[in-house]
Image (cartoon, rainbow, N blue to C red):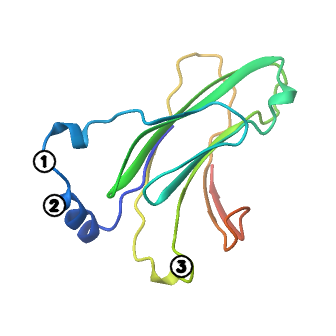
Amino acid sequence: MKLLLPLAPSLAAAAAAALPKGPSVLEERQIATLCDQFGTWNGIGYTVSNNLYGESSATSGSQCTYVDSNLVVGLSWHTTWQWTGGAGIVKSYASSAANIPAGRTISSILTMLTTATWTYSTSTVQADVAYDLMTTSTGSGGSYEVMIW
C-alpha cells in the first residue's frame, strides 16, 4: 500500500516554493524500513508504524513497512507482507498518522487529501483491505473511527 498525505493546495504550493529545485527533492527515496513489531518512524509532521498484530497466528511470514519520502508537502510509504497459516485471522497492518499540534481542533483542518493503492502479486491472496481513519487526543488508540472496506 502506498499512502500520500499532501497538505492543502495553498500550503503545499508555499512549501514547495521554499524547497530547493532539482529532481533529487522530488525523487521517491526510501528513508526508513520498519519490520519489527511496533516499529515506528517519526518525520516532518507524520508518524508511520508497523504492527505485527496477529503474527503468532501464522505458521510463517513477515511484514515490512517502508517510508519512501517525507517532505513538507506530504508523505509516501508502502508495505510488503507474506504470511502462511492461520487462515482468516489478522496478521498485521501498517499505519500512518498526521501529527496535529496540541490544542488544534479537527474543525480547523480544512482538507487532508490522501491516496491509497492496493496491489498484489499472486492469485492466491486472502486479505481484507481497509482504509481506516481515526482521531485521538492522546496519541494512541482511536477516539473516533471511520473504516472503509
Q: Residue at x 71, y 42 (%)?
A: 38
- Is 49 drawn above or below residue 135 in the view shown? above
The amino acid beneath tag 1 is Lys
Q: Which residue is mark 3?
A: 106
Label located before the other in sequence (3 or 1): 1
How packed mark 3 is, by other alpha carbons closer than 10 Å (few <14, some 14-19, many 20 or more), is few
Q: Which residue is mark 1?
A: 21
- Is 11 drawn above or below residue 130 in the view shown? below
Q: Which residue is mark 2?
A: 17
Q: Would you say the residues marked 2 and 1 are in contact, meaning their CB atoms lie under 8 Å apart?
A: no
How packed mark 1 is, by other alpha carbons closer than 10 Å (few <14, some 14-19, many 20 or more), is few
Q: Which is closer to the viewer, label 2 or label 3?
A: 2
The amino acid beneath tag 3 is Ile
Q: Would you say the residues marked 3 and 1 are in contact, meaning their CB atoms lie under 8 Å apart?
A: no
Decide if residue 49 is on the left or right side of residue 26: right
Q: x%, y% of residue 55?
A: 80, 30
Q: Residue at x 59, y 16 (%)?
A: 123
Q: Which mark is residue 74?
A: none
**Element type at mark 3:** helix
Q: What distance separates the C-alpha of mark 2 from that of mark 1?
A: 9 Å
Q: What distance separates the C-alpha of mark 3 from that of mark 1?
A: 33 Å
- Residue 117 visible here: no
Decide if residue 20 is on the left or right side of residue 90: left
Decide if residue 118 is on the left or right side of residue 86: left
- Residue 48 visible here: yes
